Image (tube, rainbow, N blue to C red):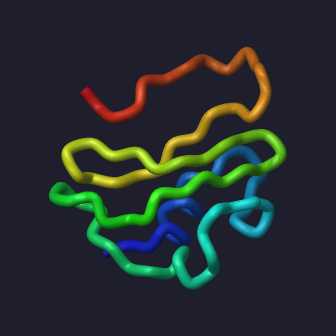
Amino acid sequence: MTTWRNTITDYLEGNDTIKDLEITLTDKELDVEFDDEYGSVEGKPFYAWSKDYVYFPVCYDGAESVGAMPRNPSKDEPVHYGGG
C-alpha cells in the first residue's frame, strides 16, 4: 500500500519537494492509501507542476507510479512510459 504523497515524494526530480508543487489533489487526497501493485487502478489521477517539471500518474498492468517531463522545452532525453 502507498499514497500519492509517498510515491510522488520518492520520484521528485532535481531539487523539487512536494511543498514546491502546484497539484490537483488536496492534502487529504494525497494521503489516501491505495494498492500500487499489479491489479486495478486505485490512485486518483492528478497533475502536479513545479518550476521545472510536470508530474503525472503512470499505470502499467494496474501497477501505479509517477512520471515526469520537463515543463519547458529542454535537451533532456525523452523516455518511454508504461513499461514494455
Question: Residue 7: where, in percent of width, then height?
Answer: 48, 63
> Against 40, is 56 above or below?
above
Which residue is depicted at the point 58% across and 40% down? 68
Tell which residue pokes out farthest to the left in this image: 39
In the picture, measured across the screen, residue 77 lies left or right of residue 59, that is: right
Tell which residue pokes out farthest to the bottom in this image: 28
- In depth, the one of 54 and 11 nearer the eye is 54
Which residue is depicted at the point 73% across and 45% down? 14
In the picture, measured across the screen, residue 53 lies left or right of residue 37, that is: right
Which residue is depicted at the point 51% across and 42% down? 67
Q: In what quadrant of the picture does the C terminus appear?
A: top left
Q: How many labels does the image show?
A: 0
> Against 29, is 18 above or below?
above
> Against 53, is 62 above or below?
below
Question: Residue 44: where, in percent of width, then height?
Answer: 43, 65
Quarter-of-image position of residue 16: bottom right
Question: Residue 77: where, in percent of width, then height?
Answer: 60, 17
Q: In what quadrant of the picture does the N terminus appear?
A: bottom left
> Against 34, is 36 above or below?
above
Question: Residue 58: where, in percent of width, then height?
Answer: 41, 45
Quarter-of-image position of residue 75: top right
